[in-house]
Structure formats: C-alpha cells, structure tokens
C-alpha cells in the first residue's frame, strides 16, 4: 500500500505541474484584467517599485502577495537586511554553491545546464524566492571584464544553447529566471554611465542572440536591464532595446526589472518599457526621505505625471499586467513544488558540472593524471589552494554550507602521498569596492614556498585570480592581464628549484602566460563552488577524464584581443562614450579572420585519451532556405581510457557580399565513448542560421552561394570539411 500511495502522489504532482501550459491560459489573462480594474493608482504604482532591497509590494487587501527576489546565478544569496546591504545574520540561509557560469559554458553540455537550473531553482523555491536574478549571458569581449566569470563566454550560439535549458530548469520550480544584463554590459569599468555605440550587425549577430533565445526558446519570465547606455539612452528604459526589440519584435510577455539603481528618468522609465524599479534608493526609509521608496522614479513622480495628464494610466496598467502575470507564474502559483536545499543530489550535480567544465590546457609528457596511489612528495603551493572563492565577487557572493578547497581535495584523494603546503603569496582580504593590501610579508611567503618546492617530487601550483576588487569581481575591471600579486616572480623561483611543476589555474578570465613553456601542465579550473576541491582531485587523479572546452579565446597578449587592438575609445572608452570598433569580429572570429594565433583557441580542451573523426557527410549537396542541413560523422575513441569529446561544427560563407568571419560556430554535440568505441552522430543546422543581419534593410538575409562546414574539436583543430550550396 505504501508503494501505491507514493506512486499516486508522484502522478498527481506530474499532472498538476505543467506550469507553462497553465501560465499561458486565457483564464489567467481574464483574472489579471479583473484585478487591474480593482486596483487604485497608488496600488498599481506600489507594485512597480521596490519596498525593500529585494522585494516589491503586493496588494494585501486583494490577497496579492509580495515578490521576493534573490541574487544568483551560482546559488541563492544569503539574506540581506530590509534597507541596507548588510547580511541579515540568519543561521539557515547557507546554500549549495554551484560552479560559475564560465565553467557551465565550458561543459558544452546543455543537459548539465538543465540540471544546474533545476537544482538552483529548487534551492530558490525552498528559500521562498520568486525571482532568481540570473543567469547572465553578456558576451565575453575583453579578458579584463571583472564580471566575465558570471557569463557564458564569447560565442552567441554557445550562450544561446546553454541558457535555454538553465531557464527551463529554474522555472519548473515556479521560480522566475531573470536573464541579465540586457544588454551590452560587457565591462564593469564605468558601467553605470558609459554610452555604447556599435553597428546594428554587431548588436543583432553578437550581443542579442542569447537574450532572444532566452525569450523565444526559454520562455523566460523576467529580464534584468543593464546599467550602461546604448545610443544615448539607459538600457533599463531604452525605446529601441525594450519597446521595439524585446517587447514587440520578440513578443516578450514577462517583466523587465532594473539592475539595482539603473533607473534615471521617470518619463523614460514609464514610456520605454521598465516594469519594476529596484535599488534606486540606497537607504530606503532608514535615514532620510530623499531615497524613500515612494520617491522612486516609478512611484510619486510618476503618479504626479499621471494626475497632471502628462502620461496615461494605461501605461502603468501594462506594467501591472506583466507583474501580475509574473506573480501567477510564481508567488500566486499554488501548484508549484516546495523545493529543496543542500541535498546530496545538489552537491553531486555541482561536482558533475565542475568535473565536465575543467579544461586541460597543457599536458607535457602526460604529467596528468597523477596516480592516486602515489607515495611521492607533492608540494601544493598558492593562496588559491585554500582561499574561499564563494565569498566576494559582488552580488554573486554566496554563503555556502561547505566549500571543499583544492588542498582538502588533494589531501582526501592522495592519501598515500606526502603532501606539503605553502601559501606562496597573499592577495589580502576581499572587500567590495576597494583593495586592502595583505599584511603578510611577500618575501617570506615566497621563501617558504620555494623551500618546500625544492623538497618535493612535483609541484602543483594553485594560483590565478580571485574574487577581490580588480580581479574577477563586480564593480570594476582587472588592471592587468598578467597574474597578480607577484605570482610570476613566485613561479619563476619555484621553477628554478623544481621543473616538475604544473599549474592549477583558478579564474573566470584568460591570463597572460609568458611562463607557459616552463610548466609541465595547466588545468583551467574556474570557480567551482561547494565541491571545488573534490572535482579538481577527480580530474588530476584520473578518476574523471577531462572534457571541458574553452568558452572564450586566450590571447597571447592583451593587444591581440579585438577590443584592445583599436585603442582607448574601443576599451574602456573616454569616460562618456565607447565604440565597439571590432564590430562582429569578437573572440575567435577576430583571431581567425585576422589570422592572429591565440594562446588557446575557443573550444580547445585536451583529454587523457585521443579521438578521431571520420566519414563526415551531409544528407545532400544543395539546400533551400527552409531546409535543415544534417551533418553526420563518425567519432572514435582511439585511446586506452573512456572519455568525452565535443564535436564542433563551424560554418564559412565562401561567397558573401559583406564581411563575414572566417568561421562561426553553428552546432556542437558532446559524446561519451568507451576506449576503442565508435559512434556515428548527426548534428542538424537550419539553413536560415547561415544568414547575416542586413543593416541596410534591418532584417536577416540569407544569400545563395557556397558554404563550407568545418568539423573539429575546437575553432582551430579541424578534422574534415564539407561544401554545400544554398539556393
């Protein structure tokens, strides 16, 4: 009987939980119109702006609840006080910290993206959050951007394919994903005011696609506007971006929420599509009336404009309509599940994503994997071996229930080894908005590290960046491309006494590597969250074969990056304006089109085994605009261990009337193969995806002619090609 009970309960949950079908019903729209008729103007406006740092008002007399939001996108942020940014000091708000989104993108695995979204959505639901402020899909334009670690890389196709399942996973829990930052928030320096100028082609081909996919394929329920300006208007109330593109062209039926403090004008906020204004006041009602919630742009100032006849009340009705729709999908959805938090399942998902996202960049003489039964002496050197990485970084900071450090992970896995540890360098404490130098003596830290390096059979140097200000952190950008905190000097001294040294690079960004020829191996491990140390040890020990691929290009030097090759006006701007002079040639598009050899190319990642791609073919030779191209190939694991490989398909337009990149990613698929196993796979590409944005007609254009498909395992490691014609 117990088994029958649980089966019937599960069946009932499945029956009542198709949220999307329910949320799009006509009955919901009718209810919304009935509610709007009963609301006073004051009640409507109260719903359009914050009532605390992370909530907006409902209407108590009608039983309409508040909306509660939480920062993401890597976990549910600790509770914040009502009117300040201080932690509320709760004892039950520790979360599972999932890997940063750069790591998720590096998995090239949409199935893992869905698992990620579902798990973080369950945690948000358990904490009674209605809106999770994430994921982020701003394009990686410069390796100095302090917030790149929160995003999904440099390629719009990859970001589009990875963001959609994340949204689906989150929203299955009755929690709204809030995709951010719409749009062109591609640097933190001067983010609150810089005006971005770029071509329509670059806007539509590079910077909008992931947001469009989030809306039209992900059916996302909310979007967060960006801080910066675009063509002279702030992005949170921008007539072109919001009214025309987002709400008209893409038919977005959800809610546009500001980034905190990103509203600047009452009339524009009212007329140009902003729905909920957050964070305009920094002190709420605690110390003065100046920043009181009723004085937000969409509060009393808008009320006066409506009462004076300057703006129609119907403008507010549209905002309330969208907010109520969001509420019916979240806070007023009685059938949403209860959620869960800090379960073993969530830790396992975090670990699996971390494992698949780690990228093996170099492995001279098969330095990795290290036999977990080894009795050798291993020196673990570097502050990042023990530094907590879930703290800091800005709004993505997390209070996690545990964070396994790299050192702990190595100690637990290599139990027979003699493990030594030295800090080597110190970055100082993490404080948002400013740098506090370390009080530790750099010379003595270095000396101690060199001493233990000389005593070891091998050195694992765990360095890179961290979440401090001017590193991988919201609020400003990096100040240097090379490793900070005199790490290059430390590495140089270590290598003098022990050449058997490998680097475990913890970062969300590319770094300069003038020392690359001197280290035996390099693993790019990102910020991996709660299970960081376990996942790193899984890869280094060979328990898991690395399969991550770089979601962005590592340039040899900063000037090789497109944004930095055009001077100050291109990056960071002149303080007022900025021009994206590289246009559509971002990342590998720039390197490959201009034939600039990168340090590591987009899509690159090594394995402990080898793969071969053969027998590539397409289903036919000539296609029309409504066709779908089917490309098949055989992939074989030719090595001695099981592993995963990502087949990547790039398109080259051989006869275009306009400048196009030498190649663009149009399809990918991750395959798991046992040693010696072969599989034949198919990847389908709609012919329309070969279009470019024609800025003379402001529409997508597909030209007839010859195209070449390049099939490989990175943007530069191409195995075979296929030529086709489009009529």
Image: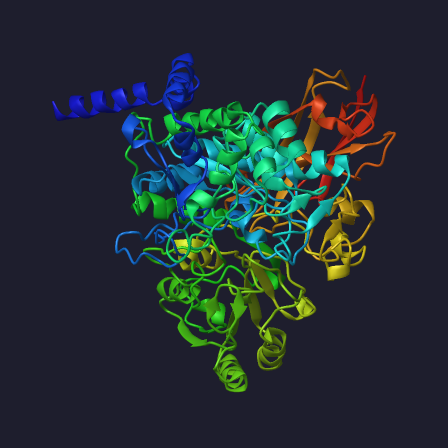
Report the quarter where the C terminus lies. Answer: top right
- Give the camera-side residue of 245 and 661: 245
Q: Measuring 21% from the left and 20% from the top, which residue is drawn there?
A: 8
Residue 541 picture location, percent across and down: 45, 59
- Give the camera-side residue of 65 and 10: 65
- Give the camera-side residue of 191 and 597: 191
Q: Relative to 679, does residue 454 appear above or below in the rendering?
A: below
Image quadrant where residue 154 sits: top right
Report the quarter where the N terminus lies. Answer: top left
Residue 549 picture location, percent across and down: 59, 47
Residue 387 picture location, percent across and down: 44, 67
> Going by the image, does 555 lie left or right of 373?
right
Could one spot residue 682 in this view of the protein?
A: yes
Could one spot residue 669 in this view of the protein?
A: no
Q: Measuring 29% from the left and 45% from the top, which residue is drawn there?
A: 343
Q: Measuring 58% from the left and 74% from the top, which residue is drawn there?
A: 485
> Going by the image, does 594 lie left or right of 669?
right
Residue 44 picture location, percent across and down: 42, 30
> Going by the image, does 32 lie left or right of 580?
left
């Amino acid at each position: 009987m117990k088994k029958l009970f649980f089966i019937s309960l599960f069946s009932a949950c499945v029956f009542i939980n198709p949220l999307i079908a329910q949320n799009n019903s006509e009955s919901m729209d009718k209810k919304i119109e009935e509610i709007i008729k009963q609301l006073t103007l004051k009640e409507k406006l109260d719903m359009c702006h914050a009532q605390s740092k992370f909530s907006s008002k409902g209407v108590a007399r009608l039983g309409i609840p508040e909306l509660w939001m939480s920062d993401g996108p890597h976990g549910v942020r600790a509770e914040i006080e009502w009117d300040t940014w201080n932690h509320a000091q709760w004892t039950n708000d520790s979360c599972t910290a999932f890997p940063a989104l750069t790591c998720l993108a590096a998995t090239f695995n949409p199935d893992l993206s869905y698992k990620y979204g579902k798990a973080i959505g369950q945690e948000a639901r358990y904490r009674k959050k209605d809106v999770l402020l994430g994921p982020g899909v701003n394009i990686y334009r410069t390796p100095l951007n302090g917030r790149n670690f929160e995003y999904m890389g440099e390629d719009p196709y990859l970001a589009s394919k990875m963001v959609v399942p994340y949204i689906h996973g989150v929203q299955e829990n009755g929690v709204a994903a809030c995709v951010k930052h719409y749009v062109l928030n591609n640097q933190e320096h001067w983010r609150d005011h810089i005006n971005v100028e770029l071509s329509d082609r670059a806007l539509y081909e590079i910077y909008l696609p992931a947001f469009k996919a989030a809306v039209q394929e992900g059916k996302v329920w909310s979007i967060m506007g960006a801080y910066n300006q675009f063509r002279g208007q702030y992005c949170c109330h921008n007539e072109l971006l919001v009214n025309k593109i987002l709400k008209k062209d893409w038919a977005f039926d959800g809610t546009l929420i500001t980034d905190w403090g990103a509203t600047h004008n009452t009339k524009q906020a009212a007329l140009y599509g902003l729905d909920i204004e957050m964070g305009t006041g920094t002190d709420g009602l605690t110390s003065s009336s100046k920043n009181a919630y009723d004085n937000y742009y969409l509060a009393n100032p808008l009320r006066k404009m409506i009462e004076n006849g300057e703006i129609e009340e119907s403008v507010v009705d549209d905002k309330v309509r969208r907010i109520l729709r969001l509420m019916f999908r979240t806070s007023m959805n009685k059938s949403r599940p209860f959620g869960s938090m800090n379960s073993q399942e969530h830790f396992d998902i975090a670990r699996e994503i971390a494992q698949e996202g780690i990228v093996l960049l170099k492995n001279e003489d098969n330095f990795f994997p290290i036999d977990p039964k080894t009795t050798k002496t291993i020196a673990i050197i570097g502050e990042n071996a023990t530094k907590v990485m879930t703290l800091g970084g800005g709004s993505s900071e997390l209070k996690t229930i545990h964070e396994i450090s790299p050192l702990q992970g190595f100690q637990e896995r290599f139990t027979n080894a003699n493990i030594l540890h030295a800090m080597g360098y110190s970055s100082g404490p993490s404080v948002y908005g400013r740098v506090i130098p370390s009080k530790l003596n750099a010379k003595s830290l270095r000396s101690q590290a060199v001493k233990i390096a000389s005593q070891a059979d091998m050195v694992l140097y765990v360095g890179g960046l961290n979440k401090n200000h001017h590193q991988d952190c919201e609020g400003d950008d990096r100040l240097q491309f090379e490793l900070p905190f005199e790490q290059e000097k430390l590495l140089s001294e270590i290598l003098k006494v022990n050449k058997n040294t490998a680097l475990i690079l913890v970062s969300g960004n590319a770094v300069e590597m003038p020392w690359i020829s001197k280290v035996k191996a390099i693993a790019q491990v990102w910020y991996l969250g709660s299970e960081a140390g376990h996942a790193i040890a899984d890869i280094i020990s060979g328990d898991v074969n690395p399969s991550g691929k770089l979601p962005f290009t590592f340039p040899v030097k900063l000037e090789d990056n497109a944004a930095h090759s055009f001077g100050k006006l291109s990056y960071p701007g002149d303080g007022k304006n900025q021009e994206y002079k590289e246009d559509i040639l971002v990342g590998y598009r720039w390197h490959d089109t201009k034939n600039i050899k990168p340090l590591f190319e987009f899509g690159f990642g090594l394995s402990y085994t080898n793969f071969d791609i053969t027998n590539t073919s397409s289903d036919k030779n000539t296609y029309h605009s409504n066709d779908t191209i089917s490309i098949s190939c055989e992939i074989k694991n030719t090595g001695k261990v099981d592993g995963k490989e990502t087949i990547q398909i790039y398109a080259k337009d051989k006869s275009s009337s306009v400048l196009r990149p030498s190649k663009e990613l149009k399809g990918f698929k991750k395959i798991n193969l046992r040693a010696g196993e072969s599989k034949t796979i198919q990847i389908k590409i709609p012919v329309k995806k070969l279009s470019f944005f024609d800025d003379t007609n402001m529409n997508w254009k597909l030209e007839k002619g010859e195209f070449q498909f390049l099939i490989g395992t990175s943007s530069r490691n191409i195995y075979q090609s296929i030529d086709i014609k489009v009529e």
